[in-house]
Image (cartoon, rainbow, N blue to C red):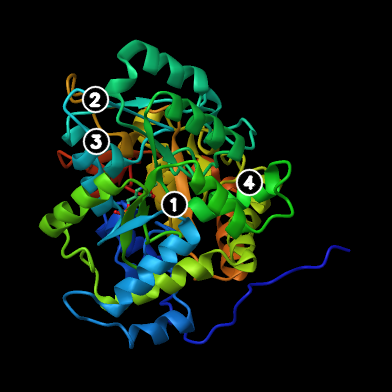
Amino acid sequence: MKKRTAEPFKIKAVETLKMLNDEERKQALEKAGFNTFLIDSEDVYIDLLTDSGTTAMSDKQWGALMVGDEAYAGSKSWYKLEKAVKDIYGYKYVIPTHQGRGAENLLSQLMINEGDYVPGNMYFTTTRAHQELNGATFVDVIIDEAHDSLLDHPFKGNVDLIKFQKLIDDVGAEKIPYLCLAVTVNLAGGQPVSMKNMREVYEICQQNKISVMLDATRCVENAYFIKEREDAYADKSVKDILKEMLSYSDGCTMSGKKDCLVNIGGFLAMNEEELYTRAREMVVLYEGMPSYGGLSGRDMEAMALGIYESIDDNYISHRIGQVRYLGQQLIDAGIPVVKPIGGHAVFLDAKKFLPHIKQEELPAQALAAALYLDSGVRAMERGIVSAGRNKVTGENNVPKLELVRLTIPRRVYTNNHMDVVCDSIISLYEKREQIVGLKMVYEPPTLRFFNARFTPLSVNGELMS
Ligand SMILES: *Cc1c(COP(=O)(O)O)cnc(C)c1O
């Protein structure tokens, strides 16, 4: 018999959850206009909206808050953070920022000239927005497999070297300041990039004098996938794998709110001195002195410790294991999910879950609402609502994937919580024909998914017929 394993931590402080009854959840959902973003956190039982900044810190991190050095310049806490980044990530220079997008802003301004091209393995919303704001055109160079939700491929985040080479041939290397390589790829479902691919991409970039800048937000999760799936890495530590991964890059932007195990924070790191000198000047304008970058001393203490905690093999294997624990149970029950299960989330395929609801009737939004109604579990729509409208024609963008994202916060929930989520989804699947589509009754002009309001397409206004 395979021995079961449990969380590699015990619980020292608890946060009591309010458990609403059926009628109360129904009211909360109606009040929120059937948009899970608009539900009050205190009305949520299990919150799988995002893994960003929702981490539970360790007792050591909480203890370190007290020793934070809040000096305006030359804080002791800053030196601890700098040392942690250099030790674990291996870059020569570090600039702290308030979160990931602060680093993206600096990097994009520092490296992009009007008319440049920035290739990437899919895009992330803020990353791409900063590139475009600075006059660059984003070019997707991820392998085609990434766009197929059912295709099982160990490294769906890989760069397609032929697509990348074609871009170099078409626009010229001098128009490409850097390639932005996300490890793992959030939008593809938390899918990793292989070490082999990173090595090859770096080689092409070096030959063409193009920098490789990582979006390192979930790099530890990526390292763990390499350990599991790539020949010759099974016996290496996640720490060593991570070091090697980052050696195939010239710098990174980091959102500490994910793999650095803190609620706020980030940094920009690089090896080139000239870029660092310019970044030190610019950070003062947008974030603060280069020794705090928008963070308090205590934030930097917590992030420095989180960086070390994140590379503990027991931590990271539990982290990925918990996401898979949920995903595999759903797969075994015949629920349509994106495969393979990624590093930070399980994605339900709403088109396949609710085939009777046309995409214009917002199946993923309806499914996320139905899940909250059933059990107080909060997920997020990633489909036609999130995709917004075409800026020129005003028509809805119609994405191929219509998904509900169940994002697992780090160290927050036990596997029992995952069982509750799983049972709720299975029970919804059994009565899926009762779920009706939605119609948007309020549509904000930008990033509509945050604030849009909906109403069920049923005669009596009920979500379940
Ligand atoms: C969260 C995230 C960012 C942005 O980081 P923030 O800390 O939220 O500003 C960038 N890239 C990826 C892949 C992310 O998931």
Q: Secondary structure at mark 2?
A: loop
CA separation in Å, label 1 and label 4: 36 Å
Report x, y in % for residue 348: 52, 43
444 sits left or right of 179 in the view: left
Residue 131: mark in rendering? 3
Query: Quick check: can you spot residue 59?
Result: yes
> Residue flagged by tag 1: what amino acid is it?
Ala
Q: Secondary structure at mark 4?
A: helix
Depth check, mark 1 against mark 2: the one in front is: 2
From the viewer's perspective, is residue 405 above or below residue 384?
A: below
Report if the CB atoms under discs 1 and 4 are less than 8 Å apart.
no
Residue topped by disc 4 = 226
Depth check, mark 1 against mark 3: the one in front is: 3
Report if the CB atoms under discs 4 and 3 are less than 8 Å apart.
no
Residue topped by disc 2 = 116
> Residue flagged by tag 4: what amino acid is it?
Ile
Quadrant of the rendered structure where residue 193 is? top right
Task: Give the mark nearer the N terminus: 4 vs 3.
Answer: 3
Depth check, mark 1 against mark 4: the one in front is: 4
For mark 3, does the 10 Å Cα neighbourhood hold few (<14), some (14 to 19), or many (20 or more) residues? many
Q: Residue furthest left?
A: 285
Report x, y in % for residue 341: 60, 45
Task: Give the mark nearer the N terminus: 1 vs 3.
Answer: 3
